[in-house]
Image (cartoon, rainbow, N blue to C red):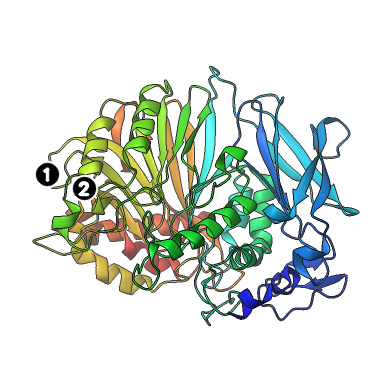
Amino acid sequence: MALGAAGVAATQMLPGSASASVAGATATAGAGVKVSGTVFKLGVASGDPLPNAVVLWTRLVPSVQGGAGVFPPSVPVTWEVASDSGFATIVRSGTASATASLGYSVHVDVTGLSPATSYWYRFKAQGNTSRTGRTRTAPAAGSSPEKLRIALASCQNWQHGYFTVYQDMLAQQPDLVLFVGDYIYESTAYSYRVRRHEGSGEPKTLTQYRARYETYGTDADLQAMRAAVPFVVTFDDHEVEDNWAGDYAKDPVAEPTATFLKRRAAAFQAYYEHMPIRLAQKPSGDDILIYRSFDFGDLARLHVLDTRQYRDVQPTDNATALQAGRVIMGDAQHKWLVDGMAGSGARWNLVASQVMMAETDSLAGEGKEWAYDAWDGYQVERAKLLAEFQDFRNPVVLSGDRHRTIVSDLKLDFDDVDSAVVGAEFVGTSISSSGDEDLVAFAAEWAPKLADNPHWKIIDARRGYLLLDITNGTVDAQLRTISTVVKRDGTTSTGATFRVTDGVPGVVRTDIETASASPSESPSESASESASASESANSTESAEPTDTTDSASS
Ligand SMILES: [Fe+2]
């Protein structure tokens, strides 16, 4: 409430802890971020690479109290794109207008670039120069790139942990970061381990959502990642509100649709203002077009979905989940996806889905308890899509949301162990959401349920991300984990590895001897195999005592 009343100066909220002073020219924020007097406190980013174009992003934030009002309605921002980090050869430049109506965000869709080429960029405004960003265009249409390295990330809860695993991601030099949702969390500030959200309630207005992005935007590791590698993003629920569905809030009685849609419009605008996405993704009121696709020569087409905006309300029982006509993508998007896969001609059809597509059965033994907020809640539409997957080349689904690594075969019928495998799914874990978990308790909880989920190759509760190396023959994936997110000195290691082979639907775990065996066949054996895999990973990287228990989670 205080936040809304306020229009509290953006600068007051920037440190995240809000207690750090930014009145001086330079102060150290709660997150350990150097906040200087520059208007470029939120850094720079690039995204949505095409063969000849890429979106460059920044957002000006005033350095003195008074928020956006201290700027004139429009501020000129010059930008430069160079072929070298020293800006000796500037290949494109121009001036954009940062306007009050868009929160002084800047989206420059730079065109006329060369395919598969790295560029450096920077902005200048109000006497300040931004940090230098680096980006890379996509390969040319019709070209045959040898390799594409994608980091799959999701779920970065400011309050649950630090985003330090981005340091490891940066070191791995991906070509692209695919962020599949929960870039911010809308939760109220509360004491949970490491950092507190700003404000005193959930964001509901544009001012409040902007403040939330400003908090997250000061994270030094996130800023460094965004500055170094182009992102392709989509949102999930927490960019708006936990478990929203279509035109409905989580609690439609407390927050009727008319009220919720105003909130959704504010959330979408703030999302646009803070993401490196094109003008086509600028929201119109409470609608945004976020599903879109990207080509990487003839190697891969990346279809980015929106499984929130067009979905029916989540079911609470299996009978509803099985009803015909219920959708998670909706007919228009479903057709777009199927047409896009049919016409892609690429070796790999990557599908970025916010939520998990493979079945989860949380009920040990007879009967099923599904993950109703995920594709499980929309059984008929999923069955249709999985049947369609058989017609397309190498479907690989990349998801988030669960705060667990779950790697699965996608099956025509999850009820039938002999049913055809039609694709593979990688559900990434989280950058920080859910914090450091009790891995022993997690393993004890899931061990009795593994037999109910024979299509799973792993379920793992460590924080981190997935690193995918896509080549003509295979997709090789590494689960990169970090030992802790509640301290800044977490150590990283490879927690497991997986492979998808061209022309062979499904996925194999490659870091354990019986890679083709499902965990359910012998949970205890899998656990011990996984333990040795963990140990060997540690022996070549950083030893971390808690890793000895990690394996039990698979
Ligand atoms: Fe999440």
Residue at x 64%, y 77% (from the top left corner): 5
Mark 1 near ligand 1 (CB under 8 Å)? no
Left or right, 95 with reference to 379: right
Q: What residue type is disc 1 on?
A: Asp
Question: How far across and how far down the image is residue 129, in percent?
Answer: 86, 51
Mark 2: amino acid: Gln
Report if residue 239 is visible in the image. Answer: no
10 is higher (above) or lower (below) than 328? below
Residue found 55% across the figure and 47% down from its top = 283
The mark that comes first in sequence, 1 or 2, is 2
- Residue matched to label 1: 416
Disc 2, SS = helix
Viewer-proximal residue among 47 and 142: 47
**Position of residue 70 measured from the top left corner of the image (x, y, whole percent):** 82, 64
Residue to which mark 2 is pinned: 379
Viewport quadrant of the N terminus:
bottom right
Q: Spot the residue most to the top.
A: 142
Q: Count up the numbered dots.
A: 2
Quadrant in the picture for residue 403: bottom left
The answer to whether residue 212 is left or right of residue 8 is: left
